Image (cartoon, rainbow, N blue to C red):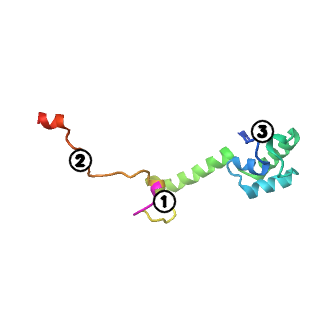
């Protein structure tokens, strides 16, 4: 399993697709990296030579933030929004959608499972008999 920028990429996939397993690299950026490194996008990851892996790694490092640096930057941006108490920051704090979606219905992904309020537990026969 080839390792690029500290990430194990799948060996049986084409390198064009395998690079997208690195956080911050999509299909377009993957193709651009492979073009600059001079690697055929159709080769399988397991067929790469050490030299090709070195070329790919150097191009990725030159190109910009990926993996840990990018995750850290995104987290800091969200934290900054929360610190300045802007609208988007308060939505992040409350765990609600930040981009104007409706929340009366839907938004279950951000809000989590339904919280049912006002339902009382039925008394069991043992507690009813004791009372």
Task: Check disc 3 and report the residue beneath it.
Answer: 2
**Separation of residues labelled 1 and 3 (CA atoms):** 37 Å
Magenta stretch: includes residue 36: no
> Going from the N terminus, do you reach mark 2 or mark 1 first?
1
**Separation of residues labelled 2 and 1 (CA atoms):** 30 Å
The quadrant of the image that shows the N terminus is top right
Q: Main secondary structure of the magenta part?
A: loop
Q: Nearer the viewer, residue 44 or 59?
A: 44
Magenta stretch: give its range: 104-108
> Going from the N terminus, do you reach mark 1 or mark 3 first?
3
Q: Nearer the viewer, mark 1 or mark 3?
A: 3
Task: Check disc 2 and report the residue beneath it.
Answer: 120
- Residue in the image at 82% along x and 46% along y: 56
Q: Where residue 44 is drawn, which disc sits there?
A: none
Residue 47 position by quadrant: top right
74 left or right of 25 in image:
left
Residue 114, percent from left and from top: 38, 52
- Residue in the image at 19% along x and 41% along y: 123
- Tag 2: Cα neighbours inside 10 Å, few (<14), some, or many (≥20)? few
Q: Are marks 3 and 2 in contact (CB under 8 Å)?
A: no
Tell me the SS state at disc 3: loop
Q: Nearer the viewer, residue 51 or 91?
A: 51
Tell me the SS state at disc 1: loop
Residue 20, percent from left and from top: 71, 50
Task: Check disc 1 and report the residue beneath it.
Answer: 97
Tell me the SS state at disc 2: loop
79 left or right of 1 in image:
left
The quadrant of the image that shows the C terminus is top left
């Amino acid at each position: 399993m080839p390792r690029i920028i500290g990430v194990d990429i799948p060996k049986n996939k084409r390198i064009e697709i395998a690079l997208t397993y690195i956080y911050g690299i999509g299909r377009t950026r993957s193709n651009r990296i492979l073009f600059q490194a001079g690697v055929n996008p159709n080769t399988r990851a397991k067929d790469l030579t050490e030299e090709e892996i070195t070329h790919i790694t150097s191009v990725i490092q030159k190109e910009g933030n990926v993996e840990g640096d990018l995750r850290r930057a995104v987290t800091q941006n969200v934290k900054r929004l929360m610190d300045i108490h802007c609208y988007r920051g308060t939505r992040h704090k409350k765990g609600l959608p930040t981009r104007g979606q409706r929340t009366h219905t839907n938004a279950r992904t951000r809000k989590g499972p339904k919280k049912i309020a006002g339902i009382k537990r039925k008394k069991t026969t043992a507690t009813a008999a004791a009372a």
